[in-house]
Amino acid sequence: MPQRSPRNHRTNPYPLDRLLGQVHHSAAGSLWRFRTELSALLAGMGGIWELAKAVTLAWAMIITATLALAVVTVPPTRRTAIRRAWCVLSRHRIQRVCFETRMHTRSGRLPLVLRILPTEVGERALIWCRAGICAEDFEAHAPEIAAA
């Protein structure tokens, strides 16, 4: 007999979630959430394209690999790249913890994480709270945010 999932529609501990608030994933919202990854991808592809037009594709790949190796091996650039990567990851974690702790509007809209900057001891986030979400909600869920 196949193993059944312990969380089906009859054993769901949150049966009223569909009635109270549904999170809608729009194309604009997805683009906003992944704006850093998309802009880095487009800038990298555009840079390689322009470099390949200036020199051959083989030399463009050699130059790109050398640049990537330099970023990885030189300590200041490596630290900067790692700190920026953690900021991007933290943005996604904050968005997820806002969804999981129900810090969203009744229509399911999450607060906007406008910017995350690395600091000497961690990161600083600028979050735009929508109507219905306040700073006290973030204070009440501080342990969950710290765990995320």
Image (cartoon, rainbow, N blue to C red):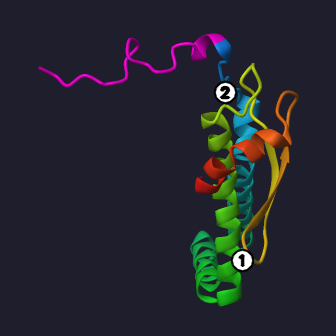
The relative height of residue 92 versus residue 56 in the rendered view (above or below) is: above
Residue at 88 percent across and 28 percent down: it is: 131
Query: Callout 2: few (<14), some (14-19), or many (20+) C-alpha neighbours within 10 Å?
Result: few
Local SS, label 1: helix
Side of 14 relative to 139 (left or right): left
Residue at 84 percent across and 27 percent down: it is: 132
- Which of the two residues, 104 or 49, is positioned nearer the viewer here? 104
* Amino acid under disc 2: His
Side of 12 relative to 121 (left or right): left
Q: Is residue 27 visible?
A: yes
Q: Which residues are magenta?
A: 1-19
- Which of the two residues, 81 or 4, is positioned nearer the viewer here? 4
Residue 25, numbered circle: 2
Q: Is residue 41 visible?
A: no
Residue 69's spot in the image, x, y percent?
58, 82
Residue 7's spot in the image, x, y percent?
37, 23
Residue 50's spot in the image, x, y percent?
75, 65
Residue at 60 percent across and 83 percent down: it is: 66
Residue 71, numbered circle: none
* Residue, disc 1: 80
The relative height of residue 131 versus residue 82 in the rendered view (above or below) is: above
Residue furthest out toward the bottom: 74
Instruction: Look at the magenta stretch and give its main secondary structure.
Output: loop
Q: Residue 88: which quarter of the image?
A: bottom right
Q: Examine the structure image and report whether residue 10 is included in the region drawn in magenta.
A: yes
Q: Quadrant of the N terminus?
A: top left
The relative height of residue 115 versus residue 4 in the rendered view (above or below) is: below
Could you give the CA–CA distance between mark 1 and mark 2, rounded to whole angstroms? 32 Å
Residue 41's spot in the image, x, y percent?
67, 56
Q: Examine the structure image and report whether residue 46 is included in the region drawn in magenta.
A: no
